[in-house]
Structures are given as structure tokens and as C-alpha cells.
Amino acid sequence: MYKVNSYLIPLDEVISALNRLKAGSIILESPIGVRDLALMLGSMVEDRVKASIYYSGRSAWGFCDVGVNDAKLLGVDAVLHVGHVNPAKYYSECRVYVENMFNIPVIYVPFYYDIKVPEDVIASISRVLSGNVYVAYPVNYEVAAIQLIKNLPKDVSYENSIITGCFTGIISKPGLYNYVLVVAGGFFHALTFKILNPNLKVLNYDPHKGEVYDVEKYFRRIYSLKVESIKKCLNAKNFAILLITKTGQYNLKLANKVRKLLQEKSFRNITICTDEVNSDLLSLYPDVDVFINTGCPRLAFDNIDQYEKPLVNPGEVKTIITGRISEYSLEKLLDVDIE
């Protein structure tokens, strides 16, 4: 493991993967917040492998967001995707893995924040937790999470796993745990568990701020905004289906099912193809009453206060069409079944 400023990266595994692929050219992509790391990693790769590197200017939001189209356009041998992994394919003993995506090898490269958890934080968390605890964290926070796990009280039983904003290991059994402890910056990942089960007690430790907090008030605020947004849809006449073109989110079949349902109910609708969803895009369509997102389900929950018009997911369309707002629950946010 190589230490680069405040990061740890499995450089040897990256070089090994590139050598196995005999990659002479690559495109390197990363989240916006770690472009400094991306440039340093690229420089170290160039010192060790005879490969030309293109740096992607687009943001990579998750392991579902890989610039395969850019790779094909450039004709490179591989994509070096920094910062995300698929939890189902990641193993701590083999951190870097390769996945073929539309005949393009994608090398998923995690990085880790090298942050020491203060003793007072460990003590305060230990005082709160009891019973069965689920410790969850994005891969980048594994170092801090392991420190906390090693210092859990002896009478606390726990499970732990890596998560993303839409992937957790306890979807089928959230009721087994007294607490969920999420180790991550901000509360995006912690809210994942509240969406799955609003009754869960979820604590979030932010290693960057050194703060531990209950996410209940954040969840209640966003949930309230979400319900109000659904209510605004009840008199809608004009819909726009957002067909997300990101490789891991593209779902033409789902978009067509939504369009068919709207047509059967005599609602006017259009389909907009886009790689990104933001308030600037939605503002370009003033005649649209409701936007239906067929990509990442979190788009229709997080930052909901930034959109002037309602943004909903396919599972919520039936509630809008029937007007049965009393039956609405967050399960519909993640549901892709619109029948």
C-alpha cells in the first residue's frame, strides 16, 4: 500500500493489472473531489508502465458511472476508475479488480483516507452502541471503520460491510440490528439505511470533521420535502421521462414501460436522454410538470430542494396516477416495478 499525502492506494495491484492487460493507453477517471490524487496516481503509473494516459474531465459518481463511451472514442486499452468499487466484487485481500464492460476492461481502483480516529470519539461511540450493530462504510473509509470495529465494547455483536449510496448488505434484514453505524463523510450514505427502514437508529461518524451525529433530523427534513413533492405531482398533465445514458444506469426497457403507462392513462410525455441530471437541465423544460428518473434512485431523494419541479422515480408513478398519497412509502422510491 502506498501513502500519497492523506491517501493510501494499492499501487502495486494497479500496476499488476495494467501489465496483465498490456495496456498501452488508458483513460483515468475519478470523483471531482480527488483530482489531486488522480493526477498523482497517473504520474506514478507513467513512471512504472509504458502507457499514455488521458485524464477524464467528467465526474465519476459511482461504480455505475464509467466512461466507456469516452474510452471507445479515444480507442484506449482500459479505463482506470479511481474511487469506487462494487461491494459484491471487492475483497480486502484483493483490492483492485477488472471488469469487462462492453468489451472495454475497467480497472476499479479504491483509495483510502488515512485518518486516525481520536480516542474520545471511540469512547463516545462505544458508550452509545449496544446489542447488535451493523457497521457500514464506503470503501474509502475502511481504515477509520476498522479502527472503530476493533474498539467496540465486548458485549456488542456486529457485522460490517462496504456500501454505496444504493447498495447495502442488510436490505433483507434491517430489523436485526439495534444500531447502524456509518463511517463516511456527510450523511449521504447514512440516509441509505433510513430510506430502507425509517425506524432504524442510524449514527454517522464523519472522519473529516471528527463528528458523530444521529441522522434522524436530516432524514425527516428530506422525507417531508419528498412527500410535498409527490403531492405537487397529483395534478400534473405533462411528464418527461429521463433516460439516463450512463453505462451502469441505462435502462431503456424501464423508460419504455413508464412511457407506455403514461400513454395508457392519456398523459402527455416526452423522453429526454441525458448523462447528468441537475436543476439546470430541468429548467430547460418549463412546460414539464413532473420529471421521471430512470437512473440512480437517489437522484429523486437527495438535493430534492434544488429542483423547481418534482423529480420522481418509476415506482412512485403509480401513486401519482392514482392519487393515493396515503399509501405512499419510501419503498416506492427504490421500486422499479410500475405495474
Image (cartoon, rainbow, N blue to C red):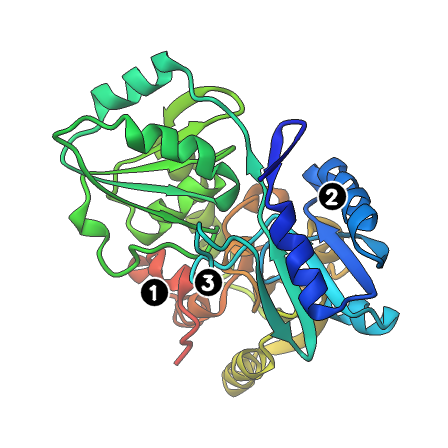
Q: Is residue 54 left or right of residue 12?
A: right
Q: Quadrant of residue 244?
A: bottom right
Q: Nearer the viewer, residue 36 or 321?
A: 36
Residue 150 rendering spot, x and y as whole percentages: 29, 30
Q: CB atoms at circles 3 and 1 under 8 Å apart?
A: no
Q: Is residue 115 visible?
A: yes
Taking 138 as reference, is 321 above or below it?
below
SS at badge 2:
helix
The residue carrying mark 1 is: 324
Q: Is residue 157 left or right of residue 87?
A: left
* Between discs 1 and 2, the one toward the N terminus: 2
The amino acid marked with disc number 3 is Lys
Residue 134 rendering spot, x and y as whole percentages: 27, 42
Q: Which mark is residue 89?
A: 3
The residue carrying mark 2 is: 41
Of marks 3 and 1, the one in the foreground: 3
Q: Is residue 249 visible?
A: no
Q: CA distance from mark 2 to mark 3?
A: 22 Å
* Between discs 3 and 1, the one toward the N terminus: 3
Residue 8 rendering spot, x and y as whole percentages: 59, 36
Q: CB atoms at circles 1 and 2 under 8 Å apart?
A: no
The amino acid marked with disc number 1 is Arg
SS at badge 1:
loop
Q: CA distance from mark 1 to mark 2?
A: 52 Å
Taking 164 as reference, is 315 above or below it?
below
The quadrant of the picture occupied by the C terminus is bottom left
**Residue under the point 73% across and 59% down:** 286
Q: Is residue 35 left or right of residue 128?
A: right
* Between discs 2 and 3, the one toward the N terminus: 2
Of marks 1 and 2, the one in the foreground: 2
Crowding near pointer 1: few (<14 within 10 Å), some, many (20+)? few
